[in-house]
Image (cartoon, rainbow, N blue to C red):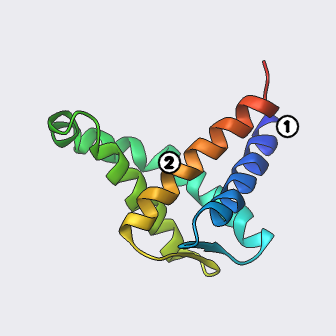
Amino acid sequence: MRLLITWLINTAALFGVTFVMQSVQVDTFGTALIAALILGLVNTLIRPVLVLLTLPVTLLTLGLFIFVINGLLFWAVASLIGGFQVAGFWSAVGGALVYSIISWALSALILKK
Protein backbone atom coordinates (compact mmCIF):
# COMPACT_ATOMS: atom_id res chain seq x y z
CA MET A 1 0.00 0.00 0.00
CA ARG A 2 2.84 2.37 0.87
CA LEU A 3 4.42 1.76 -2.54
CA LEU A 4 1.19 2.71 -4.30
CA ILE A 5 0.86 5.89 -2.22
CA THR A 6 4.48 6.81 -2.98
CA TRP A 7 3.82 6.28 -6.70
CA LEU A 8 0.78 8.57 -6.55
CA ILE A 9 2.78 11.17 -4.60
CA ASN A 10 5.48 11.12 -7.29
CA THR A 11 2.80 11.45 -9.96
CA ALA A 12 1.38 14.49 -8.18
CA ALA A 13 4.90 15.90 -7.85
CA LEU A 14 5.43 15.50 -11.58
CA PHE A 15 2.21 17.41 -12.24
CA GLY A 16 3.39 20.05 -9.76
CA VAL A 17 6.58 20.55 -11.76
CA THR A 18 4.50 21.48 -14.79
CA PHE A 19 2.88 24.31 -12.84
CA VAL A 20 6.19 25.64 -11.52
CA MET A 21 8.19 25.32 -14.75
CA GLN A 22 6.78 26.09 -18.18
CA SER A 23 9.59 24.13 -19.85
CA VAL A 24 8.35 20.80 -18.45
CA GLN A 25 5.03 19.49 -19.76
CA VAL A 26 2.95 16.41 -19.02
CA ASP A 27 -0.10 15.85 -21.21
CA THR A 28 -2.33 13.47 -19.25
CA PHE A 29 -2.64 11.80 -15.87
CA GLY A 30 -1.84 8.43 -17.46
CA THR A 31 1.35 9.84 -18.90
CA ALA A 32 2.28 11.19 -15.48
CA LEU A 33 1.65 7.77 -13.91
CA ILE A 34 3.91 6.06 -16.45
CA ALA A 35 6.58 8.75 -16.19
CA ALA A 36 6.60 8.58 -12.37
CA LEU A 37 6.91 4.80 -12.53
CA ILE A 38 9.80 4.92 -14.99
CA LEU A 39 11.50 7.74 -13.05
CA GLY A 40 11.29 5.61 -9.93
CA LEU A 41 12.74 2.58 -11.69
CA VAL A 42 15.54 4.62 -13.27
CA ASN A 43 16.40 6.25 -9.94
CA THR A 44 16.41 2.85 -8.25
CA LEU A 45 18.35 0.85 -10.84
CA ILE A 46 20.49 3.17 -12.98
CA ARG A 47 21.23 6.18 -10.76
CA PRO A 48 23.34 4.28 -8.16
CA VAL A 49 25.53 2.85 -10.93
CA LEU A 50 26.04 6.29 -12.47
CA VAL A 51 26.82 7.83 -9.08
CA LEU A 52 29.41 5.14 -8.44
CA LEU A 53 30.99 5.51 -11.88
CA THR A 54 31.19 9.30 -11.61
CA LEU A 55 32.37 9.36 -8.01
CA PRO A 56 35.71 11.11 -8.80
CA VAL A 57 33.94 13.92 -10.68
CA THR A 58 31.35 14.18 -7.93
CA LEU A 59 34.07 14.52 -5.31
CA LEU A 60 35.90 17.15 -7.37
CA THR A 61 32.73 19.23 -7.72
CA LEU A 62 31.86 18.73 -4.03
CA GLY A 63 28.70 16.81 -4.92
CA LEU A 64 27.29 19.23 -7.47
CA PHE A 65 27.68 16.69 -10.27
CA ILE A 66 24.75 14.78 -8.72
CA PHE A 67 22.48 17.54 -10.08
CA VAL A 68 23.83 16.83 -13.57
CA ILE A 69 23.15 13.10 -13.16
CA ASN A 70 19.61 13.77 -11.92
CA GLY A 71 18.96 16.15 -14.81
CA LEU A 72 20.27 13.71 -17.39
CA LEU A 73 18.10 10.91 -16.04
CA PHE A 74 15.03 13.20 -15.92
CA TRP A 75 15.72 14.27 -19.50
CA ALA A 76 16.26 10.66 -20.62
CA VAL A 77 12.92 9.56 -19.18
CA ALA A 78 11.22 12.52 -20.87
CA SER A 79 12.72 11.52 -24.20
CA LEU A 80 11.44 7.95 -23.79
CA ILE A 81 7.83 8.80 -23.00
CA GLY A 82 5.48 10.49 -25.42
CA GLY A 83 3.45 13.21 -23.74
CA PHE A 84 6.22 14.11 -21.28
CA GLN A 85 8.41 16.89 -22.66
CA VAL A 86 11.39 18.75 -21.25
CA ALA A 87 12.74 21.74 -23.20
CA GLY A 88 16.45 21.08 -22.67
CA PHE A 89 19.24 20.05 -20.34
CA TRP A 90 19.01 22.95 -17.90
CA SER A 91 15.25 22.61 -17.83
CA ALA A 92 15.76 18.95 -16.95
CA VAL A 93 18.16 19.82 -14.13
CA GLY A 94 15.69 22.37 -12.76
CA GLY A 95 12.78 20.00 -13.28
CA ALA A 96 14.55 17.19 -11.44
CA LEU A 97 15.32 19.55 -8.56
CA VAL A 98 11.75 20.85 -8.32
CA TYR A 99 10.40 17.28 -8.70
CA SER A 100 12.57 16.13 -5.79
CA ILE A 101 11.51 19.02 -3.56
CA ILE A 102 7.78 18.60 -4.26
CA SER A 103 8.00 14.82 -3.85
CA TRP A 104 9.87 15.18 -0.57
CA ALA A 105 7.37 17.74 0.78
CA LEU A 106 4.33 15.66 -0.18
CA SER A 107 5.89 12.52 1.27
CA ALA A 108 6.63 14.32 4.52
CA LEU A 109 3.02 15.51 4.74
CA ILE A 110 1.28 12.30 3.70
CA LEU A 111 3.57 9.45 4.77
CA LYS A 112 3.98 10.05 8.47
CA LYS A 113 5.58 7.21 10.41
Q: Is residue 46 left or right of residue 82?
A: left
Q: Is residue 70 left or right of residue 50?
A: right
Badge 2: how crowded within 10 Å, few (<14), some, or many (20+)?
Answer: some
Q: Please tell me which of labels 2 and 1 falls first in the chain.
A: 1
Q: Are marks 2 and 1 in contact (CB under 8 Å)?
A: no
- The residue identified by callout 1 is 1
Q: Quadrant of the C terminus?
A: top right
Q: Quadrant of the N terminus?
A: top right
Q: Residue furthest right?
A: 1
In this rendering, the answer to whether 109 lies above or below 75 is: above
Q: Residue at x 81, y 42 (%)?
A: 5
- The residue identified by callout 2 is 43
In this rendering, the answer to whether 28 lies above or below 6 is: below
Residue in the foreground of this view, choosing between 74 and 101: 101
Q: Residue at x 61, y 81 (%)?
A: 82
Kind of residue indicated by mark 1:
Met
Residue 73 coordinates in the image, percent (x, y) = 43, 59
Badge 1: how crowded within 10 Å, few (<14), some, or many (20+)?
Answer: few
